[in-house]
Image (cartoon, helix red, strand yellow):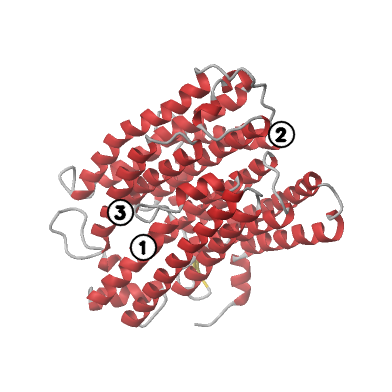
Amino acid sequence: MNPDYVALFNALRPETALVLGALAVLGLDMAIDRRRPVGERQRYALWVAAIAIAAAFVPAWHGPRGQVFGSVLVLDHLAVATRLGVLVLTMLTLGVIRAAPVRHPAEYIAVMLFAATGLMLMAAAQQLLLAFLALELASLSLYVITGIGSARPDAAEAALKYFLFGGMAAAFLLFGFSLIYGVTGSIELPVIAAQISVQGTNPILLVALVMVLVAFGFKVAAAPFHLWAPDVYQGAPAPSAALIASASKLAGFALFTRLLWPGFHAASGSAATFAGGPGWLPAVAVVCAASLLLGNFAALAQVNVRRLLAYSAIAHAGAMLLGVMAAGRSGPGPLFYYASTYGLATVGAFGVVTTVAISSRCEKISDLAGLYRRSPFLAATMTVYILSLAGIPPLAGFFGKLMVFSAALQLGGVAGPAGWLALLAIALSAVALYYYLIVVKQVLVADPPANSGPVAAPAATKLALGAAAALIILLGLFPGVILGLFQ
């Protein structure tokens, strides 16, 4: 490899802008704002972070394409779209922070920018070492913002659980990568793919792929590697939970798809027939079914709104795994559309819960009762988010499910394993509709508590929530806006 550092810097301008923005947030707070009130410090930090994200957006959209620095990075359609998606979701999360004052605001927002940097690198990584480093940069940052943003004891407990499960998942991933290197003699995905196509699958490679699947099952909160998710979604500060549920899931699926299809395509096995050979597709199908069943049925028993969103996230992870299975045939477009529009709805839902909590308690689903009287704007946007998660047309969530399920049905038709999984996901959508409509009923039909008053939202939070709802509606009406990124 003949390294071209100028081309590398040009390709990493979006990540560079985020890192410089994080350093600027810390420097400004240390030099000027330490003696100011926390709310004022948070406002300045948010402005600097927003400028950094805006500065990163332009080179992410118009930057170079193709292989970078040998084969270490690849800026293809999936990488570019995921970088843009991470930036949009991170910007919306900043609006949620405005409604949820956090301790140590400069440190919190700076670490959030570092997390976004890692997530963007994950999308473009084409080398196992860079993929692991980017994943750990994002993961360690998310562990931190889970614990430092709130003084609540359950936030510290959530951060500890998240860290312990994440550390174990990182060990599985690194061990799996080391076995892959031992089998193929390379850490670059194109070389790994060529070696596997020549050598075929062997027991060591299958063990390595299982370890990689375990690690990414944790990252995307898929069953049975989901045990951290309900506690983290409930205990973490709402902006942290929103970023974990949206941008982290989007980047995780992007990296997962890149590793499995371009890298390990020759070891995929078959999802078209029940007699398919050994490979990772049957294992992904089992995790997909487990996530769909556990996520939807466990969500039925939830009374805490955040835990409901957590089990809903597990069910959606199962549906997105269908998109991973179909990506080898249909491309990553349907999966990205599903993951990005799901992220918009999840950020918005956490934003509404956080805003309601400003004036009253908002832990249980019943705490949203009568929101249509307390804040018509929040009630309207929450309805859009929940109905999109439920897959009601013409919102983007419906078309995301339609694209993913249609792509899965092309893998051998209805009679094949992928077809059965698609039918299972469609059937369980009715279960999901029930618990989503419980939330909508509380928001639009139930009477507000006697001692409740109007809910006021900061202007920045209103802007973020309105933008998320508008994007869900517009992307449902014009899905080609996203799918055009993959042409």
Q: Are marks 1 and 3 in contact (CB under 8 Å)?
A: no
Of 202 and 71, which appears nearest the observer? 202
Question: Residue 303 falls in which quadrant of the image?
Answer: top left
Disc nearer the start of the sequence (2/1): 1
Q: Is residue 204 left or right of residue 458?
A: left
Disc nearer the start of the sequence (1/3): 1
Residue matched to label 3: 287
When the figure is inspected, residue 268 is found, relative to residue 449, above or below; the finding is below
Q: Secondary structure at mark 1?
A: helix
Question: Residue 459 appears at what percent x and percent y?
Answer: 71, 33
When the figure is inspected, residue 263 is found, relative to residue 484, above or below; the finding is below
Q: Name the amino acid type tagged 2.
A: Pro
Question: Residue 63 appears at what percent x and percent y?
Answer: 59, 60
Question: Residue 60 appears at what percent x and percent y?
Answer: 59, 56
Q: Is residue 464 left or right of residue 252?
A: right
Looking at the image, which residue is at 31% across and 80% down? 183
Labelled disc at residue 396: none
Disc nearer the start of the sequence (3/2): 3
Q: Name the amino acid type tagged 3.
A: Val
Residue matched to label 1: 214
Residue matched to label 2: 458
